[in-house]
Image: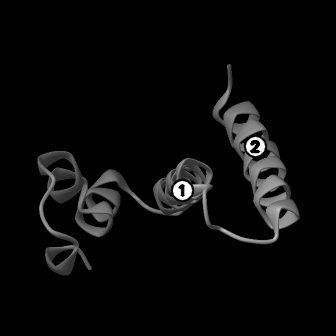
Amino acid sequence: MALKDIEDELDQEILKLYESIRHFGSFEGHDEEVILLDYLITTKQLLLINAKNDMEYFHRKSKIEAIVEGRPAKNIT
């Protein structure tokens, strides 16, 4: 599967999940859906950073080590 196909599928899933959450009218009781939407949006943002810049920039901007190591969010900018 090509990266463009993955991005298109990701866009579709983000929109589908967003519409589903919006339909609920409230975030209460839908924590998993909101968290999944956040992860999908973050993945999309990382793909965009990667597509527009070189790997060194991506590595620096994504703070991927901090995410993998589970550092507190205050250390991730």
- Return the residue nearer the eye: 28 or 9: 28
Q: What residue type is disc 1 on?
A: Asp
Residue occupied by mark 1:
31
Q: Residue at x 83, y 48 (%)?
A: 16
Q: Which image quadrant is residue 23 in? A: bottom right
Q: Secondary structure at mark 2?
A: helix
- The percent coordinates of residue 54 (x first, y second) are 38, 57
Dot 2 crowding, Cα within 10 Å, few <14, some 14–19, many 20+:
some
Depth check, mark 1 against mark 2: the one in front is 1
CA gap between label 1 and label 2 equals 17 Å
Residue drawn at (18%, 80%) of the image:
74
Q: Is residue 47 above or below residue 73?
A: above
What is the tally of numbered marks visible in this picture? 2
Residue at (48%, 62%) from the top-left corner?
49
Q: Quadrant of the C terminus?
A: bottom left
Is residue 57 toward the left or the right of residue 24 in the image? left
Q: Nearer the viewer, residue 25 or 66?
A: 25
Q: Which mark is residue 13?
A: 2
Q: Kindly give the residue lying farthest to the top in the view shown.
A: 1
Q: In this orientation, which residue lies closer to the viewer: 53 or 23?
A: 23
| Residue 22 horizontal side relative to residue 1, left or right | right
- Residue at 50% from the left image edge and 52% from the top image edge: 39
Going by the image, does 37 lie left or right of 10?
A: left
